Image: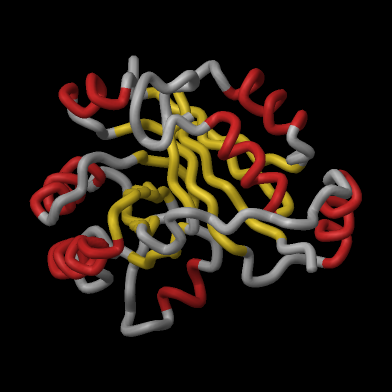
């Protein structure tokens, strides 16, 4: 049975074109690229070999085996110097539209048999925090007190405001920031609880906070 996964990659700005080229060579051909801003302190940049805070964020869809193939060939297993100055996280898809699924399977190689199991399955969570503009630095301070080492800020707009504002007269700004924090499962709950206590929907930040289980996390 062919399984489909999604990979979120956060790499140094300007590396996306070459990174996607390598992904395509592993039969991972469907990508969405957006801009982000990292929050890692200078000491963490030294540890992970990062150069600056400006990030390319790439969301890639592929078969489990194709993404494993990429991870095994490009990963530094969270150590050593990263070729693209960032991290990649693989997680399972819960659903996808039929045509997209057919495109992914068709573009993948046929050597899907004997797929290796992910080595660090569900040891990490990707915590996503969507808040009104201007709260990312304060949120990262709270997250770091709970053990987070850094995050990436993605700026965007919130859709469906009318529905959300019907809930207890919640007033949410259209301009939003999404803070993504990769954290071990052991501390992700504390990060979420602490952030929610200060920046949840009852605060001025109007935060929406959730997490996604990460099947594999590795340096790229």
How many marks the image carries: the answer is 0
Question: Colour scheme of this structure image?
Answer: secondary structure
- Above or below 134: residue 112: below
Q: Is residue 187 above or below residue 16?
A: below
24, 154: nearer the viewer: 24
**Residue found 75% across the figure and 32% down from its top:** 24
Residue 16 spot, x, y in % from top left: 59, 24
Query: Which one is in front, 26 or 73?
Result: 73
Is residue 73 at least partly visible in the picture? yes
Foreground residue among 158 and 9: 9
Image quarter for residue 191? Answer: bottom left
Is residue 199 visible in the rendered structure shown here? no
209 relative to 113 in the view: left or right: left
Most distant residue in the front direction = 114
On the picture, is 102 further left or further right than 27? right
Residue displayed at 73% across by 66% down: 96
Relative image position of residue 129 (x, y in whole percent): 34, 57
Residue visible at 30% across and 63% down? 185
Figure quadrant of the N terminus: bottom right
Q: Decide if residue 106 is on the left or right side of residue 190.
A: right
Image vertical order of residue 57 relative to residue 174, above or below:
above
- Please report the residue visible at 42 percent of the width from the left and 63 percent of the height from the top: 122
- Where residue 199 sits: x, y (%)? 20, 62
Percent across and percent down for residue 41 are: 18, 29
């Amino acid at each position: 049975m062919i399984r489909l996964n999604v990979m979120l990659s956060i790499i140094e700005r300007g590396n996306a074109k070459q990174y996607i080229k390598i992904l395509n060579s592993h039969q991972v051909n469907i990508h969405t690229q957006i801009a982000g801003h990292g929050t890692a302190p200078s000491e963490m940049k030294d540890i992970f070999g990062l150069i600056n805070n400006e990030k390319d964020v790439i969301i890639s869809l592929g078969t489990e085996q194709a993404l494993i193939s990429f991870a095994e060939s490009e990963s530094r297993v969270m150590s050593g110097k990263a070729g693209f100055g960032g991290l990649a996280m693989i997680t399972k898809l819960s659903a996808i539209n039929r045509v997209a699924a057919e495109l992914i399977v068709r573009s993948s190689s046929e050597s899907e048999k004997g797929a290796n199991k992910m080595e660090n399955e569900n040891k990490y969570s990707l915590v996503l925090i969507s808040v009104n503009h201007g709260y990312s630095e304060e949120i990262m301070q709270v997250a770091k007190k709970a053990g987070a080492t850094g995050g990436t800020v993605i700026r965007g707009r919130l859709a469906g405001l009318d529905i959300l504002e019907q809930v207890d007269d919640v007033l949410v700004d259209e301009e939003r920031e999404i803070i993504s924090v990769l954290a071990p499962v052991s501390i992700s709950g504390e990060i979420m609880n602490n952030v929610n206590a200060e920046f949840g929907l009852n605060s001025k930040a109007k935060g929406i906070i959730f997490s996604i289980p990460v099947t594999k996390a590795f340096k790229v």
